[in-house]
Image (cartoon, rainbow, N blue to C red):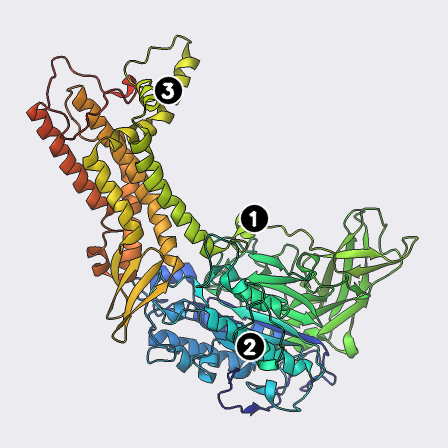
Amino acid sequence: MLLPRPQLNTFLGLVTLANVVFGQGQAPAEPLDGLAWVVQVSDLHLSAFNYLPDHYAHFGDKEGDLRLFAGTVLSGLAPGALLLTGDLVDGKTALGRGHQLKTEWEAYRRVLDAIKEESGLPEEAILDLRGNHDDFNVPHRGGAVDFFKDYAAAGRRNATARVTITPLYAGHFRAAWAAGRHFAQGLGDCPVALLAGCDATPDPGLRGPTNFAGFVGASELADLDAQLAQALSFYRARGCELELVAYGHHPLAVIAHPDTRPWTRSSPSRIPGEPITGGASAHFGQGAPQLGPATVQDVLQRHGALTYLAGHLHGIFGQRLHRLHPGPDGGHLAELETTAWKDDRRFRLLSLDGSDLSFVDLSFHTPSRPRAGASADPTPGTAANFSITGVEPGRLVSNWVVHITSPPDGRYAPLLPGMPRKYKAVRALVLPVRPPSAAAQLASRLKVSLRWECAASRTGGQATMTPVAGRGPLWQAAWPRERPCRLDPGDRVVSLQVVADDRSGLVSSSDLRPVALRIVSEGGRSTVLSTPPAPLPLRQGVWERAMLALDWQRLAHRLFHALWAAQLLGLLLAPRLLGNTPSARRWRAAFGPALPPLRGGPSSLLASAAAAAAAAPAVALCDMAEDPAVWWPLAAYSLGLYALPWFMAQFLSGEPGLFLMGKVLYRLDGRWHSRADPDTLRVGSVHLALTVLPATLWTATVTSRWARLLAARRPLRPAVTPAQWAAAAPLLALHAAVAWRICFVSYGWPAVLFSPGLAWTAPLLAWLLVARRRGVLAARRRGGPAGVGTPVSPCTWPAALLPELPAGAAKDR
């Protein structure tokens, strides 16, 4: 059975929209053919510790604000579906250790019940899925501690499904919602789209930080491919033209695939001519071999998905984590990540007008989170004491959300391949952000107008919009084909804005939408709106552009190996192999006491000091490489980071585990299991960059100074200079923070006590230096070299950096 159909029961209750712009207590007489809309909310992070003052001060009343949102905004928007894309609960103890708490899931169920009661949305229209926080410390999907199965809407329908496909019908939530409607013969009309939920949380769900990335293996890819093919073929065989909208928790770049080759751009499953294992060809008798899918993105683009909606990254990298992934046929897949309800009270309204996809990102402001995600002061609050702002500039939300559905935003088009599409009218949804009973009176006074401005000439105009079929919420205005503005040669983009005025003193408007303008007559008098040949520029920050463009899995592999190679090859092997060559010794001697003074004035002295400072680390590393008592332990530690466990931990409650480079070993059901995990490389890269490499350089400066003082028979006092202590202080603080967060907070004291690769780094280094200093002092008392086989060069640092030797000082006391 490919699609989750727990009981195949059909929900046939008729849900009506009362006392809104359609009339008194009746559903619209005519459906809004081809137009549907959904609302997305992500990363709720309902927490059992929300009552704590510090937690509440940072995040406000997340549960209470959701209840208010359901009874006001969601009730007015009346979407065809509500997408809750993961991290439904926080899944952590008060300290921050991953653990599923039943009280958090009970709070989430209360929220779902409030959504159903306050908004009228049936539970079948609530499409939720797991996030990584919902999967912390869950040994078995659908098991005893997997509370998703007991409290989530999708979990009650099918607790173990990774792929959930639901039809989205036109207009408001329709009369028939059924999990298995795809295969029920002869039921109703065609849906506008299929909503495909993709759960990429690992199974089992380990504690973080080894649970940040999603994980989709070959069997899960084949299952996704087969289910999409089966569902789309079912409808298209009946003459339905429908689109595909996918949603999940993890952005596509954060989903790991075990067959990925980190050092190439291809994957084994992309070998030309390989058939899809268990995929569409197997179910529909398509004999021609196809390319096997390598990633979730490959599968979605194979089936012509318009968009993939995600969460997970909150607002760490920006408010517009959007990317258009080009397809081989000239179309695009729009990946749209949204920030968190937890932080920004963010929600998204997304519409499908035929095949035209549009969306708007909004923030919900309440007394507990008055400035959540806001770039400007919120608009005046409503009687319910909330307000709404948009991420895009120019948008105003008072009593209405004004949303242009067609033509699509030129920055996110074209999504479909083929010639640019032409549009003779502008269509917009005008939806209330109040319950229907409160919006009815305002609706009777509503006036909606279209305004436009051509980009180059800065001229424009306006037109009155009228409701489709005589009633809202869809309004439209014909595009004035004859000279809508003074057409200059550069006029190929026009900005559209729809304004709604209900004469309450507050105006609502859409954002300024750039749309391509196409001249369709030789004289340049007649124009139409169209999709652009290529997407128009999207203003994003550097991080916003980069985060979804990166392959996080390959990046983690390459970054870790680059840092590890810099440690072993750059800081250890290269100085040892090259530091004693004749040219290297001459170069090192140039920065010793024999360096003649420069006679060129202050500028020459400054250049000399700069050259000495630049060469000092390399010279110190060469000196340390000549001291096997220090060099060999550092080399062994570096090799251990690559081949040996970093620490022991309970990735699952009561079960031991090992954290290694690129994978984790864990015990479950009496057996040991191994799983590739790019999150270990992410942790390792942080440890190498912030602790290991700087600590190696710091150790080199300390031991180099000791060698020079010993060779000059000067006292080793102080053993570490104030400047060296000042350099060590931030390193120790960073190391302590990383060890505390990764080892103690995530896994407890055992991970600290058995952590040679992470928490022991600073203690091991301190022990090494103490032992080495004792060896140096013992060698001085014997009157020999520094206790090593190779004498240490006395001319390795600039003479100006050496402390002055007091008269008569000959030995260390």
Considering depth in this image, is 265 or 47 the residue closer to the camera? 265
Is 184 rendered above or below residue 790? below
Q: Earlier in the sequence, mark 3 or mark 1?
A: 1
Query: Which element is circle 1 on?
Result: loop
Query: Which element is circle 3 on?
Result: helix
Is 566 rendered above or below residue 236? above
Do tag 1 and tag 2 residues touch (Cβ < 8 Å)? no
Q: Which residue is mark 2?
A: 226
Q: Earlier in the sequence, mark 3 or mark 2?
A: 2
Looking at the image, residue 414 sits to the left or right of residue 167; the answer is: right
Comparing marks 3 and 2, which lies closer to the viewer? Answer: 2
Q: Residue at x 42, y 53 (%)?
A: 556
For badge 3, the amino acid type reads Ala
Q: Position of residue 638 (x, y in %)?
A: 28, 45
Q: Position of residue 146 (x, y in %)?
A: 36, 77
Q: Position of residue 681 (x, y in %)?
A: 37, 54
Q: Which residue is mark 3?
A: 609
Comparing marks 1 and 2, which lies closer to the viewer? Answer: 2
Between the residue at mark 3 and the residue at mark 2, the CA separation in whole angstroms equals: 67 Å
Query: Which element is circle 2 on?
Result: helix
